[in-house]
Amino acid sequence: MLIYAIGKRLRQLDPFEGLEDEDIRTAIANANGTRPSLFVPEISFDLLVKRQIARYYG
């Protein structure tokens, strides 16, 4: 029953709520430094996901 409740709540969440395009660009730019990157750095992804999780629990 608990797993069902968690899954239901997760489906109701908007993963981009409170997250602007500029936030994503800034996180990627900060992770890359001065050189451009072909792929999104893992550290910027982790940072943004942790921030969204903190908003959910916070």
Image: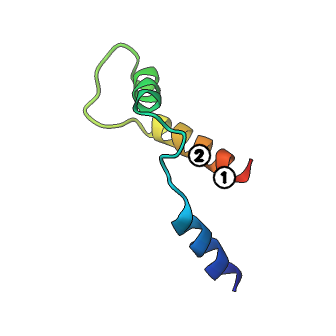
> Callout 1 environment at 10 Å: few (<14), some (14 to 19), or many (20+)?
few
Q: Secondary structure at mark 2?
A: helix
Residue furthest to the bottom: 1
13, 27: nearer the viewer: 13
42, 56: nearer the viewer: 56
Vertical arrangement, residue 47 with respect to residue 26, above or below: below
57, 33: nearer the viewer: 57
Say which residue appears at 46% left-offset and 21% top-offset: 30
Picture coordinates of residue 41, whole percent (x, y): 40, 35
Contact flag, marks 1 and 2 (Cβ < 8 Å):
yes
Amino acid type, residue under disc 2 in the picture: Gln
> In the picture provided, is 19 more to the left or to the right than 1?
left
Amino acid type, residue under disc 1 in the picture: Tyr
Total labels: the figure holds 2
Q: Secondary structure at mark 1?
A: helix
Q: CA distance from mark 1 to mark 2?
A: 6 Å
Q: Quadrant of the N terminus?
A: bottom right
> In the picture provided, is 16 more to the left or to the right than 32?
right
Which residue was labeled with disc 1?
Answer: 56
Picture coordinates of residue 33, whole percent (x, y): 41, 17
Which residue was labeled with disc 2?
Answer: 52
> Callout 2 environment at 10 Å: few (<14), some (14 to 19), or many (20+)?
some
Image-quadrant location for residue 47: top right
Say which residue appears at 50% left-offset and 55% top-offset: 14
Say which residue appears at 54% left-offset and 40% top-offset: 18
Picture coordinates of residue 20, whole percent (x, y): 46, 34
